[in-house]
Amino acid sequence: MVDYKIVGAVATGVIDGIMEGFYNYTFPTYQNVFPFVKTIDPLPPADDWLILAVPALAYLYGRARGNAKAMDFGFGGLLYAGSMFIHHTIVRAARMAAGKPP
């Protein structure tokens, strides 16, 4: 039996890795271009918001339609994306407090 929470977490992590890899590979070209635009400091850029929003939408869809697989997939993705989002916010806030650019 497939655990859709693990599938959602891994899929979200892979997509996040692809987006971060693309940004780092094409750094000067796509700097400040959607979805790699800055938001309010110390919050992460818009690409991290998208990574957080997609599993949240999957979870809400599953909840509204009574689809347990979509709900589990979205919940697993939120486990990855939520912790990643909190981590990036804390790191950016700490860098700002130390007087370094986020």
Image (cartoon, grey):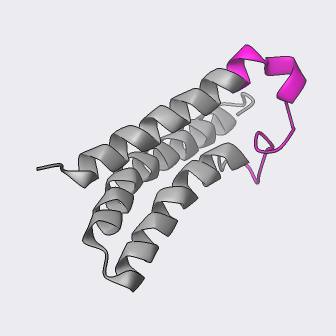
**Above/below status of 54 relative to 64:** above
**Above/below status of 5 relative to 61:** above
Q: Position of residue 74 (x, y in %)?
A: 38, 60
Find the residue positioned furthest to the left: 1
**In the rendered structure, which segment of residues is drawn in magenta?**
23-41
Q: In the visual, does 22 lie left or right of 36?
A: left
Q: Position of residue 3 (x, y in %)?
A: 18, 50
* Residue at the image point whose x is 88% and y is 22% from the top: 29
Find the residue positioned furthest to the top: 25
Position of the C terminus, as image quadrant, is top right
Residue 19 lies in magenta, yes or no? no
Q: In the visual, does 65 lie left or right of 42?
A: left
Find the residue positioned furthest to the front: 1
Q: Position of residue 70 (x, y in %)?
A: 35, 65
* Residue at the image point whose x is 56% and y is 60% from the top: 53
Q: Position of residue 22 (x, y in %)?
A: 68, 24
Which secondary structure is most common in the magenta stretch?
Answer: loop
Q: In which quadrant of the rendered view does residue 44 lie?
A: top right
Q: In the visual, does 4 lie left or right of 13?
A: left
Number of on-image labels:
0
* Residue at the image point whose x is 67% and y is 44% from the top: 47
Q: In which quadrant of the rendered view does residue 26 lie?
A: top right
* Residue at the image point whose x is 70% and y is 19% from the top: 24
